[in-house]
Amino acid sequence: MQRILGSLVMVVALFVSAAPVAAGGPPVHSSEPAPPNQFAAAELCPFAVEFGATTDRSKQTTFAVKKDGSQRFLDRGFAAGYATNLETEMTIDHAGGYMISVVINADGSVQADGHGRFFAYYFAGDRSDIGVGLFAVEGHVTEWYSADGMLIGTRTTGHVTDLCDALVPAG
C-alpha cells in the first residue's frame, strides 16, 4: 500500500501478516507495538525525520472474514508519540488516544478510518486533502485505497498540525 495513517501502515501490515481468523470464528486480539519510522530528507519533510511511540498501550483485533469476503481490523488504545527532526534533533511530543478501523474488501480495496490523536503522513503523488508531509491529527481521517494499494483519496476533519513546519527551529 502507498501510505495509510501513520500507525495504519504498521497496523495493516500486522493484521495482514497475522494468522487468518476462521470464517465465523471469534475475534483474535493482540498487542504489537509499532516500530519507529524514519524517512530521509525530502521524502516527507525537507529534513530527515523520525516518528514513533515512546509509550504504546494499544490493542489490535482481527475479525473473521465476512460472508461478503471483507475483513475488518481494529487498532485502539493510547500511544504517546514523538516526531524528531534528525538534522537538528528538535522533537515534538504528541499524546495520543485513538481508534483505527481498517476494512479490506473482497476485491482488495481498503477503507481506513482513524479518529482521536495520531500521526498521518503522505508522500508526493498521494491524493491527500492535507498535502504532503508528516502531520499530527486531532480529529478524524478516512482514507481509500484501490486494490493495487494506491491511495485514491482522503478526508480529514479536526485539528491538523504540519510537523514538517513545526520541527523547523525559529529564527
Image (spheres, rainbow, N blue to C red):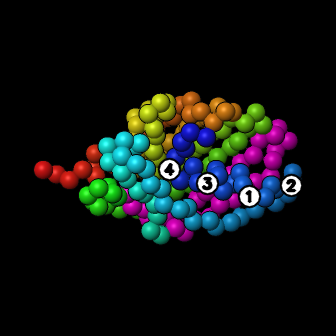
Q: Which residue is mark 3?
A: 11
Amino acid carrying mark 4 in the image: Gly
Classify residue 160 by image quadrant: top left
Disc 1 element:
loop
- Upstream in the sequence, badge 3 or badge 1? 3
Disc 3 crowd rating (10 Å Cα; few below 14, some 14-19, many 20+) is many
Magenta part of the chain: 56-83
Alpha carbon separation for disc pair 4 and 3: 9 Å
- Upstream in the sequence, badge 2 or badge 3? 3
Q: Along the line of sight, which residue is nearer the eye, 96 or 171?
A: 171
Q: Which residue is mark 4?
A: 6
In the image, what residue occupies the spot 54% across and 69% down?
Answer: 57
Alpha carbon separation for disc pair 1 and 4: 19 Å
Whether residue 53 is visible: yes
Would you say 73 lies left or right of 41 here?
right
Q: Is residue 54 above or below residue 18?
A: below
Q: Which residue is mark 1?
A: 18
Disc 4 element:
helix
Asked if disc 3 and disc 1 are in contact, CB closer than 8 Å, the reply is no
Alpha carbon separation for disc pair 1 and 2: 12 Å
Asked if disc 4 and disc 3 are in contact, CB closer than 8 Å, the reply is no
Q: Is residue 158 above or below residue 49?
A: above
Residue 16: % across, % down: 71, 51
Residue 150: % across, % down: 59, 33
In the image, what residue occupies the spot 46% across and 64% down?
Answer: 53
Would you say 168 lies left or right of 80 here?
left
Q: Which residue is mark 2?
A: 22
Asked if disc 4 and disc 2 are in contact, CB closer than 8 Å, the reply is no
Taking the magenta stretch, the answer to whether it contains residue 58 is yes
Amino acid carrying mark 3 in the image: Val
Nearer to us of marks 2 and 3 is 3
